[in-house]
Image (tube, helix red, strand yellow):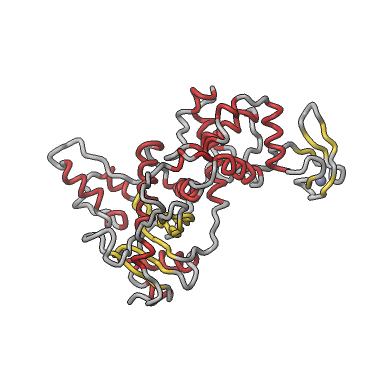
Amino acid sequence: MLPKNISLRLQFSFKRKGRLFMAMHYSRNKVNRVLTLYKLAKLTEQEAWEIFRQGRFGDKEKFACPECGAIEKHWYINTRKQWHCKHCNHRFSVTSGTAFHNRKLSFSKLLWILFAFNTGLQGANANELPSDLGVTYKTAYLNFAKIREVIFETMDMTPLSGIVHIDCMHICGKPRRSNNRKSSDSFLVNNKLRARKDSIVPDKKTHPEPSNLKKLKNRRIILALSQLALNDDGSYGSNRTITYVLKKETAEIILPLIKKSVAKGSIIMTDFGGAFNKIEPMLGITHFSVNHSVQYQNELGVNNNQAESFFSRVRRGEFGTYNGILKTYLAYYAAEFAYRNDCKEIGISQRFYSLLTKVLNREPSKAFCGYNQGKRLGFEYCYS
Ligand SMILES: [Zn+2]
């Protein structure tokens, strides 16, 4: 039953100020024209370095040594653009010990990469950078990947509140159409793609091809929890998203994650997925669900469209920008799309500088330091 004090219909109907309302993509907003690639490209190497210094240490005179933490006016070696700590004799640069540790690229190129990552609407395509910057694809991919890892590690995990839309999406491990058309026509392949149980237990009857059985074992599930918020124009959208990567879509895995990520007193909205059935009895959080085989929003206004639209952006990124995502790094990509979703109302300038500060305050990448020398992460961020 609905609590009497909550008028769901009122909360979910799109009330817009004024009679004429023209939907506008967030990228066209004025705040996204304050900082441009055109301006960044004009910066000298010294100016670009100054932006890095500002992003990492803030104060020009006194700041903490990354090694011993002593806040001091350190000796500056101008020719090497490094500092020498008076206390521990540690010598450090503006990127040492950060996600851009051991950088080979110039500061202006790194700023360009960070900017391109921020402005990509459906992901950042590393194939575009070689012609823009004159770097190799490997360099472009690695730098994007390091930024993505920082976003994953700095994701705000404080519990969501208010109304939270939750859903699951199946990704990776896509079966391919067989060469032999008799054994697998397009209708069958489409059905296979939608056969959810196959991601848990690959079925030999629907997937006779050994290669597809193997591929299906790579299938993963993204669980997205999206918090509803009121936009400036009076409509509702999502302002914070938490994502997890799962091996199976089961209540045993999903309920503890929801418990961790949704505050008591919130309202959860999902579809009729079996894993969500016991949210209310097990977690004590008010739960409404909508039957997606009949409708996307019921008479009371219950829907989980914010989670669905988040997934549609992930899917477009998967097909259109990345052309496939490895399960090993899927958690990073999910976090990237959550970041894009959460920052969409923030202006480009603020987004750019806050991401730069985040990157310069993280330790060197776990997954991508020494990647080109053959080092790999060795594990997967995945709940099973
Ligand atoms: Zn020191």
Residue placed furthest toward the right: 86
Q: Nearer the viewer, residue 142 or 45?
A: 45
| 153 w.r.t. 11: above or below | above
From the viewer's perspective, tell me whether residue 316 is left or right of residue 182. Answer: right
- Displayed quadrant of residue 122: top left
Viewer-closest of 337 and 266: 266
Residue pushed farthest front?
19
Residue drawn at x 35%, y 60% as measured from the top left? 13
> Measured from the top left, where is residue 30 in percent x and y?
51, 39
- Asked whether, in this view, residue 271 is left or right of residue 69, the answer is left
Quarter that holds the N terminus? bottom left
Image position, residue 371 (x, y; %) = 55, 37
* For residue 173, above or below residue 276: above
Q: What is the quadrant of the C terminus in the image?
A: bottom left
Q: Residue at x 31, y 49 (%)?
A: 216
Residue 382: x percent and y percent? Answer: 45, 55
Q: Quadrant of residue 369?
A: top right
127 with respect to 190 (left or right): right
Q: Residue furthest left?
A: 182
- Residue 163 image offset from top left, x and y in percent: 43, 64
Q: Is residue 14 visible?
A: yes
**Residue 256, above or below 65:** below
Identify which residue is drawn at 36% across, 42% down. 316
